[in-house]
Amino acid sequence: MIGAYRALFVAGFQNASQYRVQLFLYVFFSVLRPIIFLAAWVAVAQARGGSVGTFGVADFAAYYIALTIVLHLALAWDAYEFEFLVRQGRLSPLLLRPLHPIHYAVVNNIVWKLFTIAALVPVLALTAITFGARFEGEPWHYALFVPSLVLGAAIRFLFGWIVATAAFWITRVSSVSTFFDRIQFIFSGQIAPLALLPGALQVIAYAMPFAYMFGVPVDILRGATTFEQTLLLLAGQVFWVAVCYLALQVAWSRGLRQYSGVGA
Amino acid sequence: MRYLRLLALFVRTELQFELAYRVNFLAELLSLVIIVVTSVAAVLILFAYTQTMNGWSFPAMLVLLGVFYIVQGVGELAFTPSFQQFMEQVRLGTLDFVLLKPASSQFLVSLRYFKLSNVAQVALGVIVTALGLARLGDELTLIALGEFAVALFCGLVLVYVLLLSLSTLAFWFVRVENLLAVYEAFLDAGRFPVDIYPGWLRLTMSTVIPIGIAITVPAQAVAGRLEALGLDLMVLVTIAAWAFARWFWRVGLRSYTGASA
């Protein structure tokens, strides 16, 4: 297994280094998007004399910079590629290979992330200085951020694959993905920090997997949680990883029985 | 007149094409509804904490969001599908056949392909705009509405000019699909008034990539926030930009040599 992964990583890096313009554009997108909502919240904060709830301008800046990092490291886009594989019938040869297709996706994700983070960090540092971002975490915040990020990424990754397996039944899955992307857009802390979602929405966010994908690691990185809260949130993440893992097992084996290669 | 007839013909063939994939067509419509509804929800969340945002009231923000979806919808309905095809044709050399047809090449390149599900996006944009306008109520004057219409038209022309100019670059650089991605990134920033952004972004979106003014100025007109000379300037800039894009297109066309030549 380790040997297989090493070979996949080498191939992945060689493949990724062909796309330098894409790299630049990706970094550009990743930074521009959070700035849009950061600017909006800064405008709201200024209209209220400098702060919204416990958030001042410096906190919003820290929040959206942390979010950019987390989104970058935890986001997976497999649903889109998987639909393509099923629709074009290209999944069939992959299924015949000795490795489960999910391993290829794992490697491609990690490669692309390592490849782009180097370009992203200086741009983010610049944004942090411009907006005077305030990170107030203790050392243990940063230590616990790492498992939280990994768990968040795992939830997003598994969830994306559950949605993607819908392609076994309906072939064109992109509108299903759009639906979940938009739900995630609201409930994972992208349009507003979770603490600022109005009452009922906040409850819904913490009752669904979305908050645990991005919002939770972001708050830990920012140093906005107490030690007990952090442990509770991590437990919630572990719970959702387990649920998503089991759901994917069921969906994958059911779906594979359903699958008949398109064009075959 | 002849061009209108051609346009109707293109739309009809594209409609037949889309209706071949009916379930997908419906799914795309549904996605658009979800996207617009969640965007309105986002604005509602922001305004749960404030009455105004950098001087923009909630109804004015609704108008702005509506204009955003009208502009984005028209772009995705008519402009980007055609320009994407055009770039592909330059790369493959099949543009030769387009140039041989007895009609304006600029017309054939810009308005040949349509993604008709985006009619719904435009319609949703109109609904959101109308909701905002209705909430503005008494503050609204006929003059302001007229200014809104003029500014919106100019905004659409500016977006067309931007896309035409970006596409024209394909004559020299061949692979420019990535430039359309840049356009989309900046377009996304158009969902909020351009005046809330940091200087460099505001400047870019008001000059080189005029998406900011294309969306913000129409909303300013009905919100009574139009700066003196704002609209006159926009009309002048639009005319100048149009002239530039036409000139640039002809220069580009002259340097086109066909892919296999």
Image (spheres, rainbow, N blue to C red):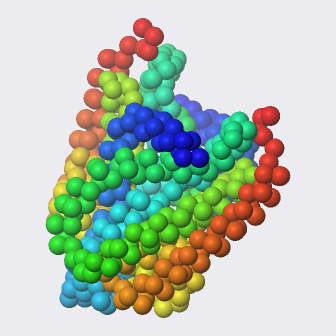
Confirm whether residue B139 shows in the render. no
Image quadrant for the C terminus of chain B?
Answer: top left
Q: Between residues A108 and A27, which one lies in front from this camera angle?
A: A108
Q: Is residue B233 left or right of residue A223?
A: left
Q: Position of residue A237 (x, y in %)?
A: 53, 76
Between B124 and B184, the residue placed more toward the observer is B184
Residue at the (41%, 60%) spot, across then down: A73
A186 up-or-down from B238: above or below: below
Q: Choose top left, top right, bottom left or bottom right for residue A174.
A: bottom right
Residue A214 position by quadrant: bottom left
**Image-based side of A15 in relation to A115, left or right:** right
What residue appears at the point 62 percent right and 51 percent down from the top-left corner? A102
Residue A132 is situated, as x and y percent measured from the top left of the image, at: 17, 72
Whole-percent x, y for residue A146 in the image: 39, 69
Q: Compared with residue A159, is residue B78 higher up or lower down, i.e. above or below?
A: above
Residue at image position (35%, 74%) is A143
B30 shown above or below B241: below
Instruction: Using residue B89 as the reference point, say whether residue B188 is left or right of it.
Output: left
Is residue A124 visible in the rendered structure shown here? yes
